[in-house]
Image: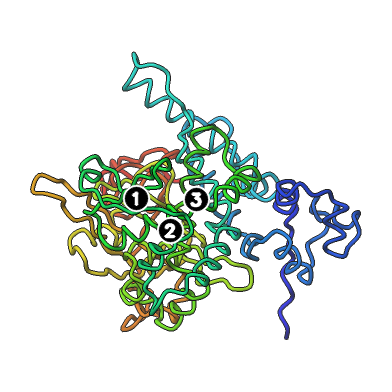
Amino acid sequence: MKKPATKLFVGSRLNTLRQQAELTQAVLAQKLGISASYLNQIERDQRPLPERHLEDVCRVFGVSPAYFSDMEEVRLVQALREVLADPLFDAARPNFSEMLTAAQKAPALGHAVMQLYSAYRNAQEQAASLADAPPQPVIEPYEAVGDWVQANHNYFHALDSAAEALYGKLAPKEGWLHPALIQYLQDEHRLQIVTDHALEQRGVRWRLEQKTNTLFLSQDVLAEDSLFCLAQVVGQLEQGAVMDRILRRSGPKGENARALARLYLGNYFAGALLLPYELYRTAAVEMQHDIDRLHRRFGVSFEQACHRLSTFQRPGAEGIPFYFMKLDIAGNILKSFSANHFMQSRFGGPCPLWNIFRAFTTPGQVQVQLSRMTDDVVYLNVARTVRHSSMSYFDRPRQVAVVLGCDIRHAGRMIYAAGLDVADQRNAVPIGPGCRACARDDCRHRSLPVSGRGIDAGSEERGVVPYRAAKM
């Protein structure tokens, strides 16, 4: 018996895309070959978006079909549950169905609640520790940029396509992009490239002096970092107008957030130039996403190879939906993007059972883990420390690690599933989004109680931790 098609009620997301593109309902309806009144009903969720029109919508707006999945709703509901668990909301806490309705019907309102709560927490922390300090911004720009990148599914089609076209024009011999990029900057932009040892001592990778048409590069960086620097310079010289259009259409608010967003777009273009979409996606499939082979094949770092895999959201040519994170040894999240349902707690540290922390005990070695989140989704996670060499005896290089993860359903396409019994659920380590948001009562690794629930100290019995969350 044929399974009935899932009804796609995507009104708010479709309306957001149309508003960002500055299209009227009449114009969009004409592009889709439907009536304006029919489109109006779809945007008000009175009718679902027919599957036969889904491809047309994705083509018009340059988004992946995943944009209209329930992934963002699931992520928003999880975030709202974490926020609304705070005792601050004891008097008026919505139930799960109400949060789900808000995520489906009014996602902008849900994100506004997240921003407001983030501002509240930042203000509380500043009041407690810096009572006599001058006022500071309560919404951190990097948080706004992270949310913006996530909303765009970490894929920017215009920059990606431009990078792919330039790579084709460069046609690097045997894949060696470094000499081709140097020649291109010299020929097309008349740049003189000079290495400068003093730059690294000042914490600078490169400096562009346009008056003298000179690009100064630090001679102390690794080869793959030098390649990325050259790609960044090309992006700054050639893609400024494209970045400005992206930011005008949907960029985050605030001067600092927009500056960080533009910096991110520059880095995005550089990564896309080093690892052009279709060439890299094809190689990843052929090599079963063996990251060690991929980063050596393309002359990039392990981190760059991982990060690029998390951006494969081109409509009609999607890759495995990965999440990607970068953490330092103290557990601070430096980068975080997800193309699947995986979501780290926004307020609090990561779960200590995660294999990214084990990676710090075996530097340079890949750690593979099956993990089960609190929603019972099992992930295949690949983690490893990434190289940051010392510049001198007195240098203190940053210790960081990256993790790339996907739903276990895609394990057969990953070399890292070799030898794993993915069917045996006992192999999956139970992890959570962080103690503050994790409801697991039997975890001996818990460091603090779950937020928003009473504490049962256990007068008649004692559990694996000295307290339990009282039953709802």
Q: Residue at x 57, y 62 (%)?
A: 162
Q: Is residue 127 above or below residue 406?
A: above
Pointer 3: what residue?
Answer: 237
Residue 416 lies in quadrant:
bottom left
* Marked residue nearer the N-terminal end (2 or 1): 2
- Which of the two residues, 402 or 213, is positioned nearer the viewer here? 213
| Residue 244 percent across, percent down from the top left | 59, 45
- Which of the two residues, 391 or 35, is positioned nearer the viewer here? 391
* Marked residue nearer the N-terminal end (1 or 3): 3
- Amino acid type, callout 2: Leu
Pointer 2: what residue?
Answer: 185
Q: Nearer the viewer, mark 3 or mark 2?
A: 2
Spatial distance from mark 1 to mark 3, Cα to Cα? 38 Å
Circle 2 SS class:
helix
- Which of the two residues, 81 or 332, is positioned nearer the viewer here? 332
Circle 3 SS class:
helix
Pointer 1: what residue?
Answer: 350
